[in-house]
């Protein structure tokens, strides 16, 4: 039996240097430190390489944890200015080319919301750790600039059925599940009647410096969307065999239990997409998958290759609005 050790939370600083900023890290230090010596058995004996795997029905079947009926997704709105998605009379989903043409809403990605520490690398300070003063300035700039936050469900309705969106829609997304996203992020979003989606890796739940299951419920009750970021942040290119069930099915089941939501949205660790993941995401019950940066949407699976961009922590409000202006159709 092969045992895979957690790739390493790196002192809660999240992923030291990355290859080009968004590739696979040069060192697998993303998930160590904060969890100590936690380990996970993720595969059976003689685990094949990720690139050679042809998933079997057993590999792609939903986990037994998913067979229990879950509460329906909360419908609480986090902003009174957010319009209800327009639902056309027909239920036919749009073609891939239509979805790609409609996929123009900018999606911003944050990680940690906390003050910098002397041990934080320059890369992490710029890309992964946003001090509260900058985060608040970003939110205020969005409001002043006339932007309205929307949920992934609203975006999905727009992409597939032409649901109406506000004039300047934007999605705020938060990766990993660090505690500052609740302490700082939730408070500031609710204060401004804004909403966001929180992509959580479930291995960290209940650990110091990370969200608890009660935090997940707090986010959901406040109208935020809960999405999955796998169990322990392995890139999907590394997965095979039983890994898929652990990383996709079981993480989703845990988040469903904690939040009461359906949990239908997924963010790829490191933003890395693999076409072999699409069928596993579909079988696990995810309706969307979010990558990073300006890679093209896959014409065969546009909903599983939706784009996001990492926010530069030190951007002023004006700089953030300038970035968004570049992404408007």
Image (cartoon, rainbow, N blue to C red):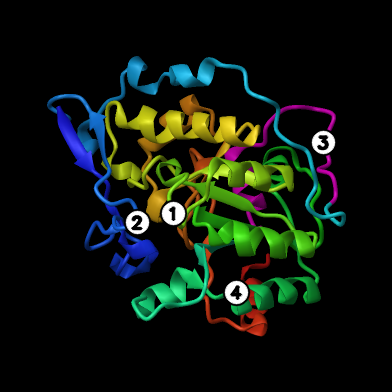
Residue sitting at x 18%, y 35%: 3
Q: Give the image location of residue 267, x and y in percent.
A: 49, 47
Identify the residue position indicated by label 4 in the image.
Answer: 132
Answer whether residue 171 is magenta in the image: no
- Relative to 88, residue 224 above or below: below
Q: Which mark, residue 87?
A: 3
Q: Camera-side residue: 317 or 161?
A: 317
Residue sitting at x 76%, y 43%: 162
- Which one is in front in this view, the residue at disc 1 or the one at disc 3? 1
Look at the image and tell me in which quarter the C terminus lies.
Answer: bottom right
Mark-to-mark CA distance, 1 and 3: 43 Å
Tell me the magenta residue range.
83-106
Q: Which mark, residue 313?
A: none
Q: Secondary structure at mark 2?
A: loop
Compare marks 4 and 1 and give the one earlier in the sequence. Answer: 4
Residue sitting at x 48%, y 62%: 293
In the rendered structure, are the residues bearing label 2 and label 4 in contact, judged by CB atoms less than 8 Å apart?
no
Which residue sits furthest front?
A: 208
Mark-to-mark CA distance, 1 and 2: 7 Å
Q: Which mark, residue 34?
A: 2
Identify the residue position indicated by label 1 in the image.
Answer: 208
């Amino acid at each position: 039996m092969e045992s895979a050790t957690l790739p390493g939370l790196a002192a809660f600083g999240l992923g030291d240097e990355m290859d080009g900023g968004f590739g696979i890290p040069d060192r697998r230090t993303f998930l160590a430190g904060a969890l100590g010596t936690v380990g996970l058995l993720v595969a059976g004996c003689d685990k094949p390489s990720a690139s050679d795997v042809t998933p079997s029905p057993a590999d792609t079947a939903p986990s037994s944890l998913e067979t229990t009926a879950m509460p329906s997704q909360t419908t609480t709105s986090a902003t009174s200015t957010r319009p209800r998605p327009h639902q056309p009379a027909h239920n036919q989903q749009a073609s891939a080319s239509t979805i790609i043409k409609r996929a123009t809403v900018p999606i911003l990605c944050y990680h940690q919301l906390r003050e910098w520490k002397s041990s934080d690398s320059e890369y992490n300070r710029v890309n992964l750790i946003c001090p509260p003063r900058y985060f608040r300035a970003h939110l205020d700039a969005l409001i002043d600039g006339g932007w309205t936050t929307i949920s992934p469900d609203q975006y999905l309705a727009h992409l597939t059925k032409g649901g109406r969106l506000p004039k300047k829609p934007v999605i705020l997304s938060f990766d990993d599940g660090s505690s500052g996203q609740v302490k700082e992020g939730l408070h500031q979003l609710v204060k401004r009647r804004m909403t966001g989606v929180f992509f959580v890796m479930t291995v960290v739940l209940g650990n110091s410096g990370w969200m608890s299951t009660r935090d997940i419920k707090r986010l959901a009750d406040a109208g935020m969307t809960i999405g999955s970021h796998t169990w322990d942040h392995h890139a999907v290119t590394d997965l095979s065999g039983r890994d898929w069930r652990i990383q996709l099915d079981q993480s989703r089941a845990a988040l469903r239990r904690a939040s009461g939501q359906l949990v239908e949205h997924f963010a790829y660790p490191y933003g890395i997409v693999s076409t072999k993941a699409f069928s596993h995401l579909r079988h696990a019950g995810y309706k969307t998958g979010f990558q990073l940066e300006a890679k093209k949407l896959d014409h065969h699976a546009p909903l599983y290759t939706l784009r996001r961009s990492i926010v530069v922590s030190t951007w002023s409000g004006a700089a953030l609005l300038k970035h968004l202006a570049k992404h408007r159709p």
